[in-house]
Amino acid sequence: MMRTALLCVVVCWLAILAGCTTQQAAKQEIKQVAEKGEKLQYVETDTGRWLIHDVNRPAPPVISPGTGSTPSQAGQAPSDAIVLFDGTDTDLSGWTSGDGKSPAKWIVRDDYMEAVKRSGPVKTKQKFGSCQLHVEFATPSRVTGSSQGRGNSGVFLMANYEVQILDSYDNETYPDGQCAALYGRAVPLVNVCRGPGEWQSYDIIFHRPIFKGEEVVKKATFTIFQNGVLVHDHVVLVGGTGWKGKHAISDYEPHEDKLPIMLQDHGNPVRFRNIWIRELAD
Ligand code: MG
């Protein structure tokens, strides 16, 4: 016990000494630069005030980047991501049905899950706010229906804000409802869809809306890459994305700071694989 306490004192003393030495070295460097008549450059950051090129500024954590997907095989998530679905969760134990309680009723095969008609959406049990979200999806290879009836699903951030999934490969519909649209709100910059049955990806950078009472004081923003191509460049979501009838808008409605990721059942057997998320500061 005595030994441990003594060790702690020595370690603390060494840490303080090291800190003092670093500070003294920094002060000496600043003095030398000032004597040469050079202008010092500082930057204010979340971690404090740092000199430009300051070796003492905290370095970012080291992670591994994972691997990319191929048409036949899903890639691996970065090492600091939360894996939401990689095919190993065969009974979808990390997901629920739309009520947030009962088991998810979608089918899992190989490394993907598939929407089951009239089973409703599926939601993650974990809740998230601002995030980087990676999702891979494939609309049915057997083409049926047209417009909104063809390969329709969706990725809902915070179970509220829909990034549309649709088979938009040679399929006309209203532009703010085509694949990669922020449904009813924002049209993607380009149509970069692959064909029916082909795996595609969304990489979504989402910053959640912030509410004060009934008011939204900071609106949500989306930056989205579809199949590696930028389709939304820091778009401010001006209101909700819910369907309220033709030409009717939906407004923001206050909600919790964190809510599930939700995938839509719109009656078409759309498939999903390799879903992972990294939480971001607001
Ligand atoms: Mg949809």
Image (cartoon, rainbow, N blue to C red):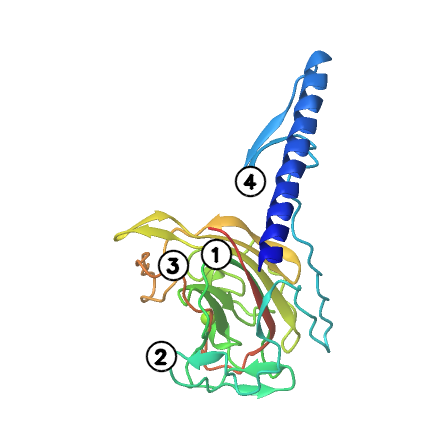
User: For the point 49% across and 51% down, which residue is it?
Assistant: 281
Nearest to the eye among marks 3 and 4: give it: 4
Nearest to the eye among marks 2 and 4: give it: 4
Vertical placement of residue 260 versus 96, above or below: above
Q: Quadrant of the N terminus?
A: bottom right
Which residue matches tag 2? 99
Amino acid type, residue under disc 1 in the picture: Ser
Nearer the N terminus, badge 2 or badge 4? 4
**Mark 4 nearby-residue class (10 Å; few <14, some 14–19, many ≥20):** few
Front one among 189 and 42 = 42
Which residue matches tag 4? 47
Q: Is residue 216 toward the left or the right of residue 12 in the image?
A: left
User: Under 8 Å from ligand 1: the CB of mark 4?
Assistant: no
Q: Is residue 136 visible?
A: no
Which residue matches tag 1? 130
Q: Position of residue 50 (x, y in %)?
A: 61, 32
Q: Position of residue 172 (x, y in %)?
A: 53, 67
Which residue matches tag 3? 257
Amino acid type, residue under disc 4 in the picture: Thr
Nearest to the eye among marks 3 and 2: give it: 3
Mark 1 residue element? loop
Nearer the N terminus, badge 3 or badge 2? 2
Mark 3 residue element? loop
How many angstroms separate mark 3 from mark 2 (CA)? 19 Å
Q: Is residue 145 visible?
A: yes
Vertical placement of residue 203 versus 212, above or below: below
Nearer the N terminus, badge 4 or badge 1? 4
User: For the point 62% across and 67% down, which residue is it?
Assistant: 201
Vertical placement of residue 219 versus 97, above or below: above
